Amino acid sequence: MISPMPRTALLCPPTFFDVIDSKNPYMSRETSIDHAKAHLQWEFLRRSLEQSGVKVETIDPVAGLEDMVFAANQVFVGTRSTLGKFIVPSRMRFPSRQREVPHYVAWFRQHGYRVIDLDFGDDYLEGHGDLIWHPDFSRVYAGYGFRTTRGAVEKFAVAMQAMGVPVIPLQLVSEHCYHLDTCFCPLNTESVLIYPGAFSAESLTELRKFWPRVHDLTQDEVAQFMGNGIVAGGNYLTPHCTPHLEQILAQEGLKPLLIDTSEFEKSGGSCFCMKAMIE
Ligand code: ARG
C-alpha cells in the first residue's frame, strides 16, 4: 500500500476571512466570526501540516475577498511529465469568489506553473473543491451538481484526456455535500472515505469500482467535516473524530490529528478546503 505523499501546501492567512452571505447550507448572514480564534486555528493547521512533514507556502490575502482562505478552490493543480507543472483556473459560481482566481493564478504563474485556460462559457468549475486526484495521480474524480456543472466537467475532461488522464464524473445530490471534498477523501491508493448519501446511485456504483476499500462515513460525521481531512505523514488531520472514524483510520494505518476549525466550518469549510497541494 502506497500512501499519498503530499510535499508542499499553499495556504492563505485568514486576515480578511468573514461570513457575509450564504453560499452553502452552513453559512448564514447572522453568523459572527471570532477573528482572533480563526487566526489561532489557522496557525495551528499550518503548524500541524509542518509537523506532519508538509512544507507550507502562503499567498498574500486580499481585502474584500472573505473566502480567499479556502485555497482549494481557485485552481486545479497538476504535473505531467510532458507538460511540467500546470494549473487550470476555476470559474467560480459566486462573483465574490471569481475575484479570488486572478490572485491565485498570478501566484502560480510566478512559481513556474503553466496556465491552461479553458473556455467554460456559462459553466462553473471549482478547483479541488470538486476535482480530486487519485493518490497515484492516474485519474481525477470530478464532483458536479451544486457548484461545478456537468458541462464544465466535460470540458475539463477533454483537456485532461489530451494529457492521458481520465476524469470520473460523480454527481452530488445532497446540498450539505455541495463540494466533492466534503464527502470523498482518499486515504491511500486503495481506500477512500465517502458519504454514500451524497452521490447519485449511478455515481456511487461507478466510484466503488476504483477502490478496493470504500469506508462509509455517517451523515453526522460528514456534517462535521470528518470527510474533509488531510492525509499527511501518517496522520489524518480532521476537525473531529468518532470511534468509528478512528477505527477506519487505524485499519488504514493512520492516526487522527485533531484540528479545531470551528470558525471556518461556519463558512462551510474545514482542513481540506484550506489548502492546495502542490506536488
Ligand atoms: N464559503 C466557501 C464557499 O462556500 C467555502 C468553501 C469551502 N471549500 C471547499 N473546498 N469545500 O465557497
Image (cartoon, rainbow, N blue to C red):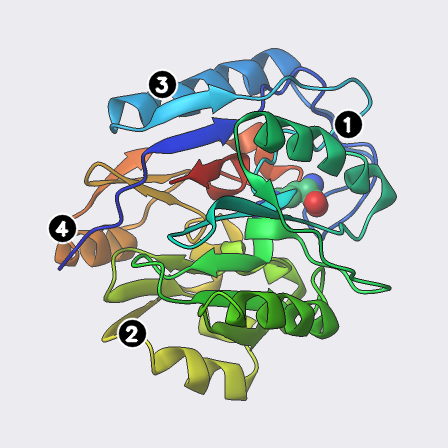
Classify 10 Å Cα crowding around label 4: few (below 14), some (14-19), many (20 and above): some
* 104, 111: nearer the viewer: 111
Q: Disc 4 versus disc 3: distance between alpha carbons?
A: 22 Å
Q: Quadrant of residue 54?
A: top left
Classify 10 Å Cα crowding around label 3: few (below 14), some (14-19), many (20 and above): some
Tag 1 residue: 65
**Residues under numbered marks 3 and 2 in contact, where contact means CB atoms less than 8 Å apart:** no
Visible in this render: residue 91?
yes
Q: Nearer the viewer, mark 4 or mark 1?
A: 1
Classify 10 Å Cα crowding around label 2: few (below 14), some (14-19), many (20 and above): some
Q: Nearer the viewer, mark 4 or mark 2?
A: 2
Kindly identify the residue that appears in the image at 72 percent across and 58 percent down.
118
Kindly state the secondary structure of the residue where label 3 is placed: helix
Tag 2 residue: 211
Q: Estimate the x, y position of residue 193 in percent, counting from the top left.
A: 35, 62
Which of disc 2 and disc 1 is earlier in sequence? 1
Kindly state the secondary structure of the residue where label 4 is placed: loop
Which of disc 3 and disc 1 is earlier in sequence? 3
